[in-house]
Image (cartoon, rainbow, N blue to C red):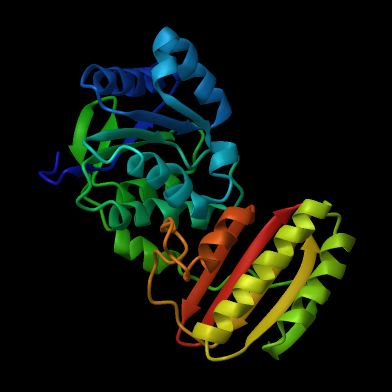
Amino acid sequence: MSASPFAHPALFYRDDAEYLTGTVPFVWSGLAAGEPVAVAVPGRNLELLRRELGADAGQVRLLDMTDAGRNPGRIIPRVLRAFADAHPGGPVRIIGEPIWAERSAVEYPACVQHEALINQAFAGREMTILCPYDVTRLDPAALADAEATHPVVIDGTGHRPSTAYAPDDVLARYNRPLPPAPDHVAELPATTNLAAARAMANIHAAAGGLSAEQVSDVLVVVTELLSNSVEHGGGTGTVRLWSEAGEFVCEVHDGGKLIDPLAGRRPATPEQRRGRGLLLVNYLADLVRLHTGDDGTTFRAYFRA
């Protein structure tokens, strides 16, 4: 293990027995040491751990990652930082499983970027985040990415340093152009008109089958993304909206380049008046994807109808 107070190992497991062997002692040793422990994993694995922990489950913060981490962009601020910041006095332990076999191809790049960014977000913090990976159900490429985003791997042979660890390379590799939009989209090119963007979003989000609450969320997201473009992305933004495969998609493109990879992933402080926009987008959308480069930055927020 590294001498750093922050540890971020990957746990490669093949079945329920290996899953429990790799996670339950981690929880129990934390509780025995008086350390706060949280578990955020998909529902089936959450119930598996809950049963195995028995009465000790009541001492652990338990979260279903399919809900809490539906959008990978909200996991650092709303799950990991929220728990760690609530216990600032000493070591903290978290089991976080953001990647599972049912994640879609559209979701997966955001998951990998999240895993890479954990290393920046918690550098120097006195905590351990253990990330399980199902080696029997995940694609080999996902396991290779896990080796690149975690400095240590735990498997049936024990602990070993990852010789492929290179989280910055992962961030660069997955900062790729987003999949093409459909041929027919609603568009406001190079605009600063927030009212027009909101009106267009209101019409198309409702027609896309979203609930009234989701339509309200879309309006907030459109407002925040376009405001961000006007202030930081060259003065204007192009808004595009469409529905596909049961999802409503809001895209904003501008001419700026996003420099801070943790933008939108830091919790806002009570006294903070500005800088909440991208964080709010991550909290409201079911998925956020982005691409940034010399030709500009594109944010794409997805809402499941």
Q: Is residue 149 visible?
A: yes
Q: Residue at the spot x=48%, y=47% of the render?
A: 78
Marks counted in the figure total 0
Residue 7's spot in the image, x, y percent? Answer: 23, 42
Residue 66 left/right relative to 122: right
Residue furthest out toward the left: 3
- Residue 294 or residue 301, whichever sits in front: 301
Residue 215's spot in the image, x, y percent? Answer: 78, 59
Residue furthest out toward the right: 207
Against 104, residue 190 (above or below) is below
Residue 138's spot in the image, x, y percent? Answer: 49, 39
Q: Residue at the spot x=50%, y=17% of the render?
A: 48
Against 254, residue 167 (above or below) is above
Q: Quadrant of residue 277?
A: bottom right
Q: Residue at the spot x=16%, y=43% of the render?
A: 5
Q: Quadrant of residue 303?
A: bottom right
Q: Is residue 245 visible?
A: no
Residue 273's spot in the image, x, y percent? Answer: 47, 68
Against 118, residue 98 (above or below) is above
- Residue 273 or residue 215, whichever sits in front: 273
Q: Residue at the spot x=31%, y=37% of the render?
A: 87
Q: Quadrant of the N terminus?
A: top left
Residue furthest out toward the top: 55
